Image (cartoon, rainbow, N blue to C red):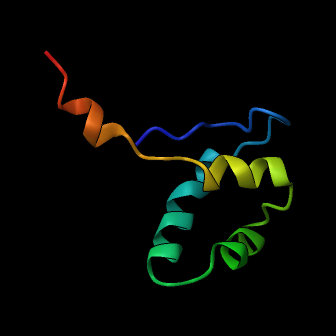
């Protein structure tokens, strides 16, 4: 899983929240509530977590 460690816009560390975000949203909680509970209030930081797509499984197919 490749998640950006810091927000590209403001520089806040967001990588440490991704695992908790994935776990809670997969259980059915809304993304808005989870991000609020984790303390991610800036829209730029929310964008970093919400827009991340896990491409590692697709990339591994093409290793030599």
The residue lying furthest to the bottom in this view is: 28
Question: For this view, does 31 lie left or right of residue 39?
Answer: left
**Looking at the rendering, in which quadrant would you find the C terminus?**
top left
- In this rendering, the count of numbered labels is 0
Q: Quadrant of residue 62?
A: top left
Q: Position of residue 40 (x, y in %)?
A: 78, 60
Q: Position of residue 46 (x, y in %)?
A: 74, 55
Q: Position of residue 3 (x, y in %)?
A: 53, 41
What residue is shown at x 71% (from left), y 50% (from top)?
47
Compared with residue 29, is residue 9 higher up or lower down, i.e. above or below?
above
Question: For this view, does 8 lie left or right of residue 29?
Answer: right
The residue lying furthest to the top in this view is: 64
Compared with residue 28, is residue 1 higher up or lower down, i.e. above or below?
above
The residue closer to the viewer here, 38 or 55, is 55
Question: For this view, does 56 lie left or right of residue 48?
Answer: left
The residue closer to the viewer here, 23 or 43, is 43
Q: Quadrant of residue 37?
A: bottom right
Q: Position of residue 50 (x, y in %)?
A: 62, 56
What residue is shown at x 77% (from left), y 72% (from top)?
36
What residue is shown at x 62% (from left), y 80% (from top)?
30
**Looking at the rendering, in which quadrant would you find the N terminus?**
top left
What residue is shown at x 79% (from left), y 65% (from top)?
39
Compared with residue 4, is residue 37 higher up or lower down, i.e. above or below?
below
């Amino acid at each position: 899983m490749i998640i950006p460690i810091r927000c590209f816009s403001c520089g806040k560390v967001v990588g440490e929240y991704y695992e908790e975000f994935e776990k809670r949203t997969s259980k059915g909680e809304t993304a808005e509530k989870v991000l609020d509970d984790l303390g991610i209030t800036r829209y730029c930081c929310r964008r970093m977590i919400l827009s991340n797509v896990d491409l590692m499984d697709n990339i591994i197919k093409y290793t030599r």
